[in-house]
Image (tube, rainbow, N blue to C red):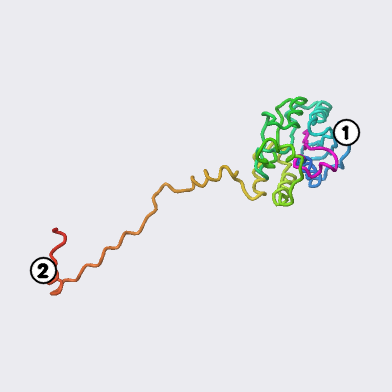
Amino acid sequence: MLIIAGLGNPGAKYAGNRHNIGFMAVDEIVRRHGFSPWRKKFQAEISEGLLGGESVLLMKPQTYMNESGRAVGEAMRFYNLGPDDIVVLYDELDLAPGKVRVKTGGGSGGHNGIRSIDAHCGKDYRRVRLGIGHPGSKDRVTGYVLGEFAKADAEWLDPLIEAVGSYADLLAKGDDAGFMNKVALAMGSTVPADEKPKLAAKKQSHIPQARPAAKKPPMAKAGPMADLLKKLLGNKDEN
């Protein structure tokens, strides 16, 4: 069995916040894969179903972001699971909007929801980081993550959520690389923006390009006039 938890804050007040992109992602999984209706258990909203032939429990912790680990930890212990049976989807400031990265373990990166799950479940679970971009300065972070997505964000947000929902079965199968690739393709690019210059440089051929040989000026035809010009001007090759 696998637990897939999307992080966010409960209630209509927070529904459209950047911090709630994890909730949005698991809602899409429910819609696309025929999971059961949401119900309350483990201090969370839960939904059950199959992904890639695997039994999956989807969770939206209702403990507020900073205490997300209480809900996920309770479910983990109830089913006698370990950290390697948990996948967490959440907002990532340090990724450009629309980018997705999956990793196992690591630090919290200052994310309070991840810090809470680390404390209650251990660190060796899979983290699906959904890029929302950074506001530019640390003192603006709280207002930014608790702010609504802008209308213009729909251009990347809607395709991202749909792609995560569509290919969630790859996460359930443990094919993290395949999941990232499929999502990137759906978003229109398989190459992270910071790696594009490197790729472009590699495409430049190290073989010099062939150039057409320069044409030589036409030789003057031999004849009386040519002989006369030679006598008057001399032979330049001898100067």
> Do tag 1 and tag 2 residues touch (Cβ < 8 Å)?
no
For the residues carrying marks 1 and 2, which lies nearer the camera in this image? Answer: 2
Quarter location, residue 139: top right
Q: Name the outermost residue toward the front.
A: 139
- Name the disc covering residue 219, or none: none
Q: Nearer the viewer, residue 37 or 13?
A: 13
Q: Nearer the viewer, residue 183 or 15?
A: 15
Lower sequence index among marks 1 and 2: 1
Q: Name the outermost residue toward the bottom.
A: 224
Q: Amino acid at mark 1?
A: Lys
Residue beneath disc 1: 41
Image coords of residue 64 (percent x, y): 82, 34
Kind of element beneath mark 2: helix
Task: From the viewer's perspective, tell me whether residue 42 is left or right of residue 197.
Answer: right
Q: Against 113, is 149 above or below?
A: below
Quadrant of the rendering where the N terminus is positioned = top right
Quarter location, residue 55: top right
Task: Write the start and end of the magenta stretch as one range.
Answer: 1-19
Task: Indicate yes or no whether the magenta region holds residue 104.
Answer: no
> Mark 1, residues whose alpha carbon is within 10 Å: few (<14), some, or many (≥20)?
some
Image coords of residue 200 (percent x, y): 51, 47
Residue beneath disc 2: 231
Q: Amino acid at mark 2?
A: Lys
Kind of element beneath mark 1: strand
> Mark 2, residues whose alpha carbon is within 10 Å: few (<14), some, or many (≥20)?
few
CA gap between label 1 and label 2 equals 110 Å
Task: From the viewer's perspective, tell me whether residue 67 is left or right of residue 125.
Answer: right
Count numbered badges in the picture: 2
